[in-house]
Amino acid sequence: MNAKVDSGRPPKTAKVKTKPKEKPIVNALVCATLDGVNARVIEVEATFTKGLPGFSIVGLASSDIQEAKERVKSALLVNDFVFPPLKITIGLSPSELRKSGSHLDLPIALLVAMNKKAFEYEGLFVFGELGLDGRVKSSSMIFPIILSLKEQGLIKRAIVPKEAIGYLSYISGVEFITVETLSEAIRLLQSGTFEAHSHTFTYDAKRLEAGGETYYYEASFRSDFADVKGQTVAKRAALIAAAGMHNLLMEGNPGCGKSMIAKRLRDILPPLGETEMLSIAKHQFLDGQQPSFKAVRPMRSPHHTATSASIFGGGSGQMAKIGEVALAHKGILFFDELPHFSKSILEALREPLQDRKVHIARVNAKVEYEADIMFVAAQNPCPCGNLLSKRQVCRCSEVEISRYRNKLSDPFLDRMDLFVVMQEIDSRDRADVSSKEMYQAVLRAFVMQKQRGQQHLNGKLTEEEIESYCLLTTDTEGILESAVTRFGLSHRSISSIKKVARTIADINGHEKIEKKDLLEALSYRRRK
């Protein structure tokens, strides 16, 4: 009677409640690195996993980033941070791109410090090098990186070191949140409220409004054209070259004033726009210099013994360095004693003179950088320098003179917009024009160019722009056609003549290129 009857159903078992698995927190911040001279966005991620305690950085990080581990550890310990007994992994993506720069210290430290709290700040870039005491320091890479990101339209706001705001504030269109210490940066992320630094900046220079844009210049002359006695033709050619940023080649006896004219050209160059000034500053930062942000175009004058790598840039490994051509961007590259430069350097210079860019190709790096330069050169007529002299006897043989001149190829010389044979020195020579007077003419020509709506100055016009802006009067067109037939001018020579004539017309205040303007431009062509 008490026997249990089996119903055929399995007995009920008590359900054991299992604790849901906690999802690991993977936070990320955005930074960037230089790939050549352009910035690439880097996503910095951090995970804390069970395992043997350690701290590793993955993603093709260079040695200065690997050293960040020690700087981050010290800075966090100073701020009373207790490292958890977990394995810390920092990932830098994209992983196939080599990264470099100590400015990645701050995002790495913030990710480690905020390991227990998930957060997401879209579009917020973080830059800064850490001191061992937790101070946030600047880095020479921050300015070129942020400027490049801004040019690409990739950055709107960023956390940066306070000591860098002095020059970063020149970059408009980006909100900068400044921090002095790591603890201050941690509090910012914890609160989630970011107050942009309101730093107003002004360029310490005179302003000029033209074509709806603002340009800056300094009317200070460290050396004056009044010091150059005589050489009326050469000074006129220098004025034309400066007004339109044309390439200039001067040939003459030793001591006749070629170098004096070249060195005084810098002070009468056209005004600079904000974009141009920032571009110059970017190249100076890449060279390790501290820019002054003055409205002065650069001038570089390397010695003729300089190597090809120092002129055009180069280097081994992933990072190629810029050279003298890039440092002369938006300014003057001056070659004194032109034929003494290596023929390979002179021939390689043809590309940047034509395309205003330089390409560096290495096994591990392909770099392209801007090189919008005004090329100025000086040379003697022969090895001894007395070939054109009426008083001195030339000691060179015909073979020596031929070998000396053959170092300059026709394609290279064809890129010279103005060619001037210097006058021989005379005791009766007097100063006839000052730098101030010449600069006033440059400013008038500059305003005319910008009022036409030109993006580039006359010497840098493209073929399409030449057709639009270099308009000739009816009788002037016939003179140009005759010159093409008589002198066998190449297409590049015709374009060069038109650009020089356009600048002369601007100096003379002519709307179109007139007969007088074109004839003067033809007079500066090299005779073969």
Image (cartoon, helix red, strand yellow):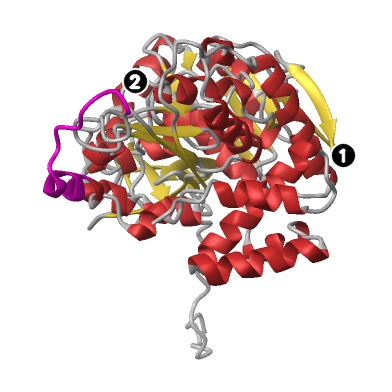
Q: Secondary structure at mark 1?
A: loop
Instruction: Say which amino acid is labelled 1.
Output: Gly
Q: In front here: 266 or 394? A: 394
Q: Quadrant of residue 90?
A: top left
Quarter of the picture containing the C terminus is bottom left
* Residue 331 horizontal/vertical position (percent): 53, 33
Region in magenta: 390-404
Image height of 197 relative to 278, above or below:
above
Mark carried by residue 63: none
Q: Residue at horizontal 28%, vertical 34%?
A: 66
Give SS at disc 2: helix
Residue 155: x %, y % from top left: 65, 42
Q: Position of residue 89 (x, y in %)?
A: 35, 42
The residue beneath circle 2 is 71
Sequence order check: which comes first, mark 2 or mark 1? 2
Instruction: Indicate left or right for 363 with 429 as reference.
Output: left
Q: Nearer the viewer, residue 298 or 182?
A: 298
| Number of numbered discs overlaid on the protein picture | 2
Q: Is residue 187 visible?
A: no
**Marks 2/1: CA–CA distance:** 49 Å
The numbered mark at residue 212 is: 1
- Image check: 180 left or right of 211? left
Percent x, y of residue 31: 51, 39
Q: Is residue 397 magenta?
A: yes
